[in-house]
Image (cartoon, rainbow, N blue to C red):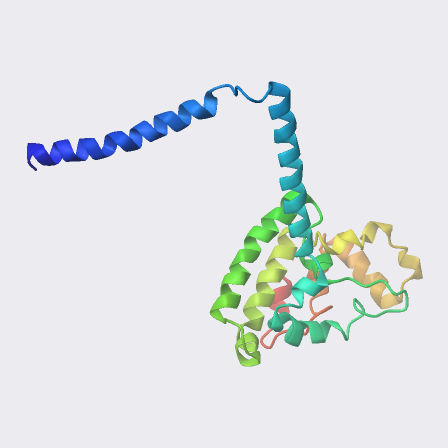
């Protein structure tokens, strides 16, 4: 490389570094137009607006309407769910998609939203865009959900159901024995209640309950 090339490279770098230094100084230089109180109030207001907008958008993605905007959800698993007790029952209490698949606590909810970007990616790719594609991957998808629920001790189930609050004496004998066994063996909801809201996939066996 010639000396002229070196000089040209240095000359090109100087304007960039100069702009960075000016920006840095501007960022840390006290404002001549705004008081400290004004800046704090403006910053606080901007933070409230951003936080409110962010949470509003995140909560909007928890609605059943949002979930059903995806045709895979609307045409496949949602139709199965409509035939279950979580959709229609004698008490009129309905568990929607987010009740079972999105944590309530903000930290875990935010983590779930980040993980959901992978689902958006596969939606764009068309990974399960047809019934045939969906059925081919149903077992893999179901096992992924089951692993997550097992790892979190069926956290979303426990938002509504608490085995310690159940009056086992008022349950049918079969249910009572199952729940007593679950307590004794420290089982979690998903160990026994797979297929409660969606059809069990072809290829499922008892190994998936371990």
Could you say where residue 191 lies in the image, as x and y percent from the top left? Answer: 69, 61
Q: Residue furthest left?
A: 2
| Residue at the (63%, 35%) spot, across then down | 47
| Residue at the (58%, 64%) spot, across then down | 143
Could you say where residue 103 lies in the image, as x and y percent from the top left? Answer: 68, 51
Relative to 191, is 137 above or below?
Answer: below
Could you say where residue 162 lies in the image, as x and y percent from the top left? Answer: 81, 52
Residue 46 visible? The answer is yes
Q: Residue furthest bottom?
A: 132
Relative to 135, is 70 above or below?
Answer: above
Quarter of the image where the C terminus is located: bottom right
Q: Residue furthest right?
A: 170
Judge by depth and name the residue closer to the eye, 205 or 86: 86
Judge by depth and name the residue closer to the eye, 206 or 164: 164
Relative to 43, is 150 above or below?
Answer: below
| Residue at the (60%, 52%) spot, across then down | 112
Residue 205 visible? The answer is no
The total of numbered circles placed on residues is 0
Which quadrant would residue 141 be assigned to in this image?
bottom right
Q: Is residue 42 left or right of residue 17?
A: right
Q: Is residue 12 left or right of residue 117?
A: left
Could you say where residue 165 lies in the image, as x and y percent from the top left? Answer: 86, 50
Judge by depth and name the residue closer to the eye, 175 or 44: 44
Quarter of the image where the N terminus is located: top left
């Amino acid at each position: 490389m010639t000396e002229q090339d070196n000089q040209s490279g240095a000359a090109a770098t100087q304007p960039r570094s100069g702009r960075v230094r000016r920006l840095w100084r501007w960022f840390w230089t006290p404002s001549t137009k705004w008081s400290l109180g004004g800046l704090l109030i403006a910053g606080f207001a901007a933070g409230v607006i951003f936080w409110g907008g962010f949470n509003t958008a995140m909560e909007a993605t928890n609605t059943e309407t949002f979930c059903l905007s995806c045709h895979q959800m609307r045409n496949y698993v949602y139709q199965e769910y409509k035939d279950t007790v979580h959709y229609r029952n004698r008490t009129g209490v309905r568990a929607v998609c987010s009740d079972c698949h999105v944590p309530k606590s903000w930290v875990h909810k935010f983590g779930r939203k980040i993980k959901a970007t992978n689902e958006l990616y596969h939606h764009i790719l068309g990974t399960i865009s047809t019934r045939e594609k969906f059925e081919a991957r149903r077992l893999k998808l179901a096992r992924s959900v089951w692993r997550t629920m097992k790892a979190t001790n069926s956290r979303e189930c426990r938002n509504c159901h608490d085995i310690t609050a159940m009056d086992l004496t008022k349950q049918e004998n079969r249910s009572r024995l199952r729940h007593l066994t679950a307590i004794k063996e420290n089982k979690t909801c998903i160990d026994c209640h797979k297929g409660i809201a969606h059809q069990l996939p072809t290829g499922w066996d008892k190994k998936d309950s371990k």
